[in-house]
Amino acid sequence: MPATAAGTRTAAARFLVIFIGGLPASSALVVSAAMYNSRGDASPSDERPNMTEVTFGSRTPRLVRPLAYAGWDGGKHGLPRPTRQAGTGMTARQVLSPRHGASGVFGDLLHRAGNVWQHALAAQPMPPQWLALGSGALALVVVASAWTWPQARTVVTIVHEGGHAIVALATGQRKVRVRLYRDTAGETVSIGAGKGLGVALTAAAGYPAPSLVGLGAAVLLTIGHLTGMLLLGLLLLIALAIAVRNLYGMLAVLVIAVTVAVVCLYASPVVQAGFGYTMTWFLLFGGVRPVVELHRDRRRRRNLRTDADQLARLTHLPGGAWVVIFGVFALAALAISARWLVG
């Protein structure tokens, strides 16, 4: 790898490690902002002058252990072995097992959670290359298949609408509300100025969001922060759940959040790695297909309320140019991430 690329990748890795270390404070700020900005619908007397409601999107469209793999002996790397607790004749894990009552269950859960946070800040061994390649092939099949894509697309929609919501909060818009629908469509509604840079940035944040999240996840996986990547995704899902305003959307976000939490707490190292790599590949491939669908729908004039059409009204660029920009970004993120994940 050229020296410039290596330096850029190292700087990005250091920034992400520092960012994970500040997750408790940043998560609290995100949650507080989302709660403040989602206190119900605005009444006429509550809205400020020159404020309008803007809608983005359209209704139509384990103890967690350090990673260990076959051929990797944790004992040779100085990992602690189970020891008997004084006076009990049992290991620490047996003492905290569910068979010892409710207190044991909660104690075991807290112990696992503590290990998750500890591993989130520590580099872990890289998985074998066959796992990275196999998870990529699986994600590609899911995205390309006409049978699995309609079921899996909701995950991409969640990240898409999450991108709108985060940028809306960052640009000072109020009462950000997200809705997700059974047909995998979604919309993000906020109160703020009907035009300007903030609205344009919010409209432009949706389609690049899955590719950008996939790129960030690839950076974390490349430097060995698998658990940190999963934990960061879990915290972002919890923050987004506060802004969701319909039952189906809430259930969809919570199901994915619970799945990630269970993988972090109880899955084996290989399962964790397979899950993390598959989701990363899925977001990268899933960032490309919606852009193709956007181009097809606009060409057939099925929907003229897309993000690209809103950006055409807000900027001097036509909607087709924005589709090209979205596509180039998605392909670039996929190419860069693929080089890191399998390189």
Image: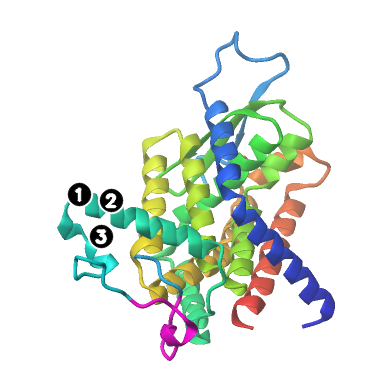
Mark 1 crowdedness (10 Å alpha carbons): few <14, some 14-19, many ≥20: few
Mark 3 crowdedness (10 Å alpha carbons): few <14, some 14-19, many ≥20: many
For the residues labelled 1 and 2, say whether their Cβ atoms are less than 8 Å apart. yes
Q: Is residue 266 above or below residue 255?
A: below
Left or right, residue 186 beside residue 199 = left
Q: CA distance from mark 1 to mark 2?
A: 6 Å
Query: Where does label 2 land, which residue?
Result: 106
Q: CA distance from mark 3 to mark 2?
A: 8 Å
Q: Where residue 68 appears, x then y in whole percent?
A: 43, 80
Left or right, residue 323 beside residue 68 = right
Answer whether residue 150 is visible to the viewer in this image: no
Question: Which quadrant holds residue 49?
Answer: top right
User: Which residues make up the magenta segment?
Assistant: 67-81
Answer whether residue 278 is visible to the viewer in this image: yes
For the residues labelled 3 and 2, say whether their Cβ atoms are less than 8 Å apart. no
For the residues labelled 3 and 1, say whether their Cβ atoms are less than 8 Å apart. no
- Amino acid carrying label 2: it is Phe
Of the 4 image quadrants, the one containing the C terminus is bottom right
**Dot 2: what SS?**
helix
Q: Earlier in the sequence, mark 3 or mark 2?
A: 3
Of the 4 image quadrants, the one containing the N terminus is bottom right
Decide which of 279, 287 is in the foreground and name it. 279
The numbered disc on residue 116 is none
For image coordinates 39% across by 47% down, the residue present is: 254
Query: Where does label 1 land, which residue?
Result: 102
Query: Where does label 3 land, which residue?
Result: 96
